[in-house]
Image (tube, rainbow, N blue to C red):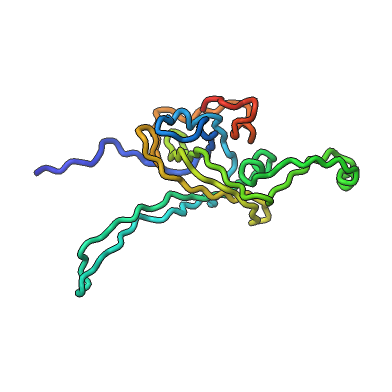
Amino acid sequence: MSIKNLGSAQQLLAGQGDIIIFSAPTGGYTSATTIAQCMTNAASLGQVVQDSTSWDGEEVSFDALLDEQGDVITSTANNGTHEFSFDLADLEPDFLKVFLGAEEITASESGVSAVFGDGTVKVFGFGHKLPVKTRPIMITNDEGDKALFFPKAKMAGSLAWADKLWRIHVVVTAEFMDTATLKTVMPLFSTKEASYTDGSVTAEDLDGNGSGSGAGA
């Protein structure tokens, strides 16, 4: 019997180009939800701190049932988990809202601005609620033409301090998906790089409450 290669052309998913989040599909996740519906309001997270991205998922494992001599009678497989984390360098208000659950506070007291030389002061607050969101997220390779896409991922952030920089530490866990069009983890291979445009996406857009909601990926 002759031996052939598994697959055809090699596909390497090397390096990290960008982390992109999307709005959760309108109407939630159903058996009819498409991948296109999971790619609205695409928003780049910008600068991720070097070497902060970590794959934290548990590997697939086996539980073995042994006989009295220690030989395996049978074994059962346990599926692994798909989790990762990263640190964001940006504390821009929309980042605070999306990952820390921050809310803008109306500060009318003159004393607040006086502390800052009578400048205009915007005040935000977080820590009063668990900042958990479920939405799609994608990590692209360094060339931007390949990606790992997680259509349904639960994510939450916390404030962190390292190397004299305050940052947002984000933890992401992919949740189980098994429909005709969506799976838990989806590698994407494109003939072109990811496309970027001018402008920005707000926290309100991502939550479906902004003027830019519904914009395509």
Q: Is residue 160 left or right of residue 186?
A: right
Q: Residue at x 39, y 28 (%)?
A: 191
Which quarter shows the N terminus? top left
Picture coordinates of residue 161, whole percent (x, y): 65, 56
Picture coordinates of residue 53, whole percent (x, y): 52, 50
Q: Can the viewer see residue 131? A: yes
Residue nearer the viewer, 155 or 197: 155
Q: Can the viewer see residue 141? A: no
Q: Look at the picture and state if 129 lies above or below 17.
A: below
Which residue is at the far left? Answer: 1
Picture coordinates of residue 101, whole percent (x, y): 65, 45
Q: Quadrant of residue 120?
A: top right
Q: Look at the picture and state if 150 lies above or below 191.
A: below
Q: Residue at x 83, y 42 (%)?
A: 107
Residue nearer the viewer, 37 or 138: 37
Q: Is residue 201 left or right of residue 124?
A: left
Q: Residue at x 59, y 51 (%)?
A: 169
